[in-house]
Image: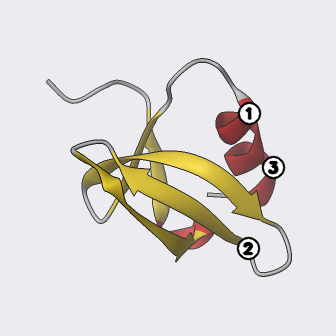
Amino acid sequence: MNNQRAKEIASSPIMANVTYNGSQIYIESVNENNDSASIHFLNQREKSQEVPLSSLTEHEYWKK
């Protein structure tokens, strides 16, 4: 995912379908200095981590 799109998703009030290693995540913030994002997992809200933007994938539709 590119830096600009990640920032758009992080600032949007609409939830985007983004995954990290196959798990749905929420982008909390974007670190432009090292092209990473602070994320938390939707199924484990207490678990957050910093990951490279290149490891995030946006999907067009939510998985059912």
Is 64 on the left-hand or right-hand side of 40? left
> Element type at marker 3?
helix
Q: Do the residues labelled 1 and 3 touch (CB within 8 Å)?
A: no
Q: Amino acid under label 3?
A: Gln
Is 24 on the left-hand or right-hand side of 49? left
Q: Amino acid under label 2?
A: Asp
Instruction: Choose top left, top right, bottom left or bottom right for residue 8.
Output: top right
6 lies above or below 12: below
Q: Residue at x 33, y 54 (%)?
A: 46
Q: Do the residues labelled 2 and 3 touch (CB within 8 Å)?
A: no
- How far apart are the alpha carbons under marks 2 and 3? 10 Å
Q: In which quarter of the image is the N terminus?
A: bottom right
The image's mark for residue 11 is 1
Q: Residue at x 81, y 49 (%)?
A: 4
- How far apart are the alpha carbons under marks 1 and 3? 11 Å
Q: How many marks?
A: 3
**Crowding at mark 3 (Cα within 10 Å: few <14, some 14-19, many 20+):** few
- Name the residue nearer the viewer: 56 or 47: 47
54 lies above or below 45: below
Q: Earlier in the sequence, mark 1 or mark 3?
A: 3
Q: Amino acid under label 1?
A: Ser
**Residue furthest toward the top?**
14
Residue 9 screen position, x and y as percent: 65, 36
**Residue furthest toward the right?**
33
Residue located beneath label 2 in the image: 35
**Residue furthest toward the left?**
64
- How far apart are the alpha carbons under marks 2 and 1? 16 Å
Residue located beneath label 3 in the image: 4
In this view, the mark in front (1 or 3): 1
- Name the residue nearer the viewer: 11 or 64: 11
**Residue furthest toward the front?**
46
Q: Earlier in the sequence, mark 2 or mark 1?
A: 1
